[in-house]
Amino acid sequence: SQIQDVESDKVKKAKNMAFAFDIDGVLVHGDRLIPEGKRALEILNGDNELGIKIPHIFLTNGSGKPEKARCEQLSKILHNPVSTEQFIQSHTPMSALAEYYNTVLVVGGEGFKCREVAELYGFKDIVVPNDIVAWDETIAPYRHFSPWERASAKPRDFSKCNIEAILVFSDSRDYATDMQIIMDLLRSENGRLGTIAKDPVTSRIPIYFSQGDMLCPTEHWTPRMSQGTFRIGLEAMYKALTGADLERVVYGKPEAATYKYADEIMTSWMEQLHGEEKLPENIYMVGDNPASDIVGGNMYGWNTCLVRTGVFQGGENDEQNPANFGVFPNVLEAVQTALKKQL
Ligand code: G3P
Ligand code: MG
């Protein structure tokens, strides 16, 4: 019948669309739910007129926890299931680096959590700044090292080993210590502490950042500085101390590598939900940060929706990186408008 035809046409269209959600500023503020996020996800998880699931992945510049732990935490906050198979954090694609470097310095995050993340990614020999402070406290002259930190650190004689790469996984909890140690390593002879290279550029070890956001929406009334500002500080210090530019690699949105990785995750998630390993034609990115979510999505050919619940606090649309599908008060309105357009 005609009604059945219309219905099956809608199902076909629904199976040809998917969403990519930013997390901070779209679905949550810190650990606090943005209420419209819960409803938006319920709709996509099947509470819609067709009763079918609409694939969505989470593409966040967030970091600092193993994927499984973060997904469990988010499932609780959002009251909707979040699987590791539909989830990409800023450092997730950095797991590929594990085969290139043996000894790495992993920077950022709470306590020793990023060491755990790096272990899960398969890195073999992981050093965190606290291991170095525990070896030689004079390296960070203003640091108060707690007994707990000392007990959980893994010191060794770092003048006898080379650190092959620096991986900034998450926001630094101690700029002074982390910047000092990173700068010492960048200026050393091939990552050997206790040395200063004659030519800092040729013997410099590589440095990677998991994302480049300047600002991050949190529970504070205005966004807080993020990894991008930390990196800019390091670049300026490096230039001032050596005269050379610091070459570096940045992951996360809006870098194309991250969107490519998202395609892979999206394709396999489509297969899980619809049984067909194929990218949908209509992908909607919902984000709050024009300089990462929106510019990246625009470049990658996605439909971009900018929401007003996070970093963006401007007028009709962002002037530098306008969202191509529109600006919405919140994620629920973005999802509803996209569904209306596609179905
Ligand atoms: O800026 C750092 C990070 O917390 C942003 O996360 O989910 O907005 O990409 P997200
Ligand atoms: Mg965000």
Image (tube, grey):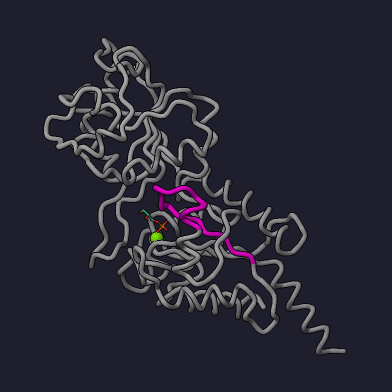
Q: So how many labels did they put on this image?
A: 0
Q: Is residue 246 left or right of residue 237?
A: right
- The vertical placement of 93 against 292, above or below, is above
Magenta span includes 62: yes
Q: Residue 240: where, in percent of width, then height?
A: 18, 27
Q: Which of the image's four quarters has the N terminus?
A: bottom right
Q: For residue 159, which quarter of the picture?
A: top left
Image height check: is 196 above or below 105?
A: above
Measured as percent of width and height from the top left, residue 6 is found at 78, 84
Q: Residue at x 52, y 46 (%)?
A: 258
Q: On the rendered structure, is 191 left or right of 269? A: left
Quarter of image, ligand 2: bottom left
Q: Say which of 295 and 253 sits in front.
A: 253
Magenta segment boundaries in residue numbering = 55-71
Can you give x and y, in whole percent of width and height, for residue 143 in the image? 15, 35
In reply to whether residue 137 is colored magenta, the answer given is no
Q: Quadrant of the C terminus?
A: bottom right
**Is 14 drawn above or below residue 119 in the view shown?**
below
Residue located at (21% from left, 34% from top): 177
The quarter holding residue 117 reads top left
Q: Nearer the viewer, residue 260 or 184?
A: 184
* Residue appearing at x 41%, y 53% in the figure: 62
Q: Toward the viewer: 166 or 298?
A: 166
